[in-house]
């Protein structure tokens, strides 16, 4: 589903939490909504999922009629009736989201199998681990096969195994629906998203692809160690691309622009007779880039 957000604003008792933001969610994209605590991520997701009305501005969905039935939403802290089993809970959720009666049983079973809860389907939810509850929350959000899936912090409260499980499910869901999710776990966001929205103090700091975000803010560094100290022999090749150059004993560290072809550099060094002991290329992570953008 395609979503257009225009001049969206939310005021809570005189405090403007969202300050007139404009962005689009592309059909079929997987967008990570990032930002520090209090930036306005949850408020934005609640307005997009129809749980909160904007003070001003518009949200336009490509599904104009009854758009809410095409949206699946998982809140930051999903809550359940602990005395229910997953089957009972999903049947209940399915009725609320108007899954046709004759399809409900099959859809509940398919969804439980998709999130890996088939074996636990008749156990009481009260005894579930955090990871199992999160997967059940996801099951509830996708049961009615929405076109847009909105997830508020789907991985933040989970241990590494639980995070991996949810990320793997998101990877699969990306194939069939548009996803918008907020997170503080930037390493995980980087694994799954292709678009990034960054919010700070209710304003957008970045709106674009992960690739262009990195191209704009990321630095690449090359750590080279050679037996013979590197002289200026390959200056012409690297100078135009070098941001920072240090050399200590036989280790040379170059911080370069992405335009330098590292293969050319390596070939040149070898052709000039250097004995290379280490040639390591490292790129800024999304976390490094995030720090630069939110500091602006
Ligand atoms: N119901 C409310 N009443 C009053 N203020 C609110 C309400 N909900 C949110 N706010 C305020 O709006 C701002 C944005 O909050 P929001 O929860 O959307 O941020 P967030 O980016 O999701 O933060 P976090 O990462 O901590 O979850 C904060 O200043 C918060 O205190």
Image (tube, rainbow, N blue to C red):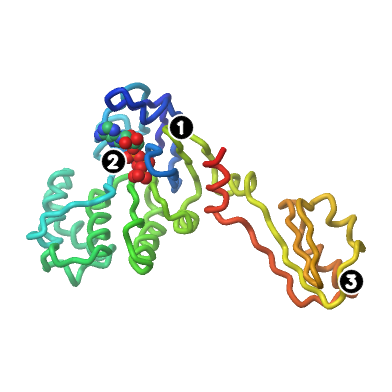
Q: Residues within 10 Å of mark 2 (few under 14, many from 20)?
A: many
| Residue named by callout 2 | 70
With respect to residue 246, does 3 lie above or below?
A: above
Q: At 42% from the left edge and 24% from the top edge, which residue is drawn?
A: 7
Q: Distance between the residues labelled 1 and 3?
A: 51 Å
Q: Indicate yes or no: mark 3 CB to ligand 1 under 8 Å.
A: no
Q: What element carries label 3?
A: helix
x and y percentages locating residue 130 in the rendered image: 25, 63
Q: Name which of mark 1 and mark 3 comes first in the sequence.
A: 1
Is residue 286 left or right of 138 when viewed as pictured? right
Quadrant of the frame with the C terminus: top right
With respect to residue 240, does 113 lie above or below?
A: below
| Residue named by callout 1 | 203
Confirm or deny contact between disc 1 and disc 3 (CB under 8 A): no
Is residue 41 left or right of 108 when viewed as pictured? right
Q: What element carries label 2?
A: helix
């Amino acid at each position: 589903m395609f979503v257009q957000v225009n001049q969206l604003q939310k005021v809570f008792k005189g405090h403007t939490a969202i300050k007139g933001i404009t962005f689009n969610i592309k059909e079929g994209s997987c967008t990570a909504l990032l930002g520090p605590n209090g930036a306005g991520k949850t408020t934005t997701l609640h307005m997009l999922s129809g749980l909160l009305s904007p003070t001003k501005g518009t949200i336009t969905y490509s599904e104009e009629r009854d758009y809410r039935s095409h949206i699946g939403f998982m809140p930051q802290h999903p809550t359940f009736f602990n005395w229910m089993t997953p089957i009972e809970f999903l049947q209940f959720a399915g009725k609320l989201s108007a899954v046709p009666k004759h399809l409900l049983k099959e859809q509940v079973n398919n969804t439980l199998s998709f999130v890996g809860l088939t074996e636990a389907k008749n156990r009481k939810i009260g005894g579930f681990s955090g990871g199992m509850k999160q997967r059940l929350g996801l099951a509830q959000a996708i049961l009615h096969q929405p076109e847009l899936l909105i997830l508020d912090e789907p991985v933040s409260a989970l241990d590494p195994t639980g995070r991996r499980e949810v990320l793997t499910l998101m990877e699969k869901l990306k194939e069939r629906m548009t996803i918008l999710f907020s997170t503080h776990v930037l390493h995980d966001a980087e694994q799954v998203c292709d678009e990034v929205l960054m919010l700070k103090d209710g304003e957008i700091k970045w709106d674009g692809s992960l690739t262009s975000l990195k191209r704009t803010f990321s630095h690449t560094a090359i750590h080279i160690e050679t037996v013979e100290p590197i002289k200026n022999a390959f200056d012409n090749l690297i100078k135009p691309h070098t941001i920072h150059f240090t050399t200590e004993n036989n280790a040379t560290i170059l911080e370069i622009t992405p335009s330098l072809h590292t293969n050319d550099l390596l070939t040149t060094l070898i052709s000039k007779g250097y004995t290379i002991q280490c040639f390591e290329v490292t790129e800024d992570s999304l976390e490094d880039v995030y720090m630069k953008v939110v500091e602006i």
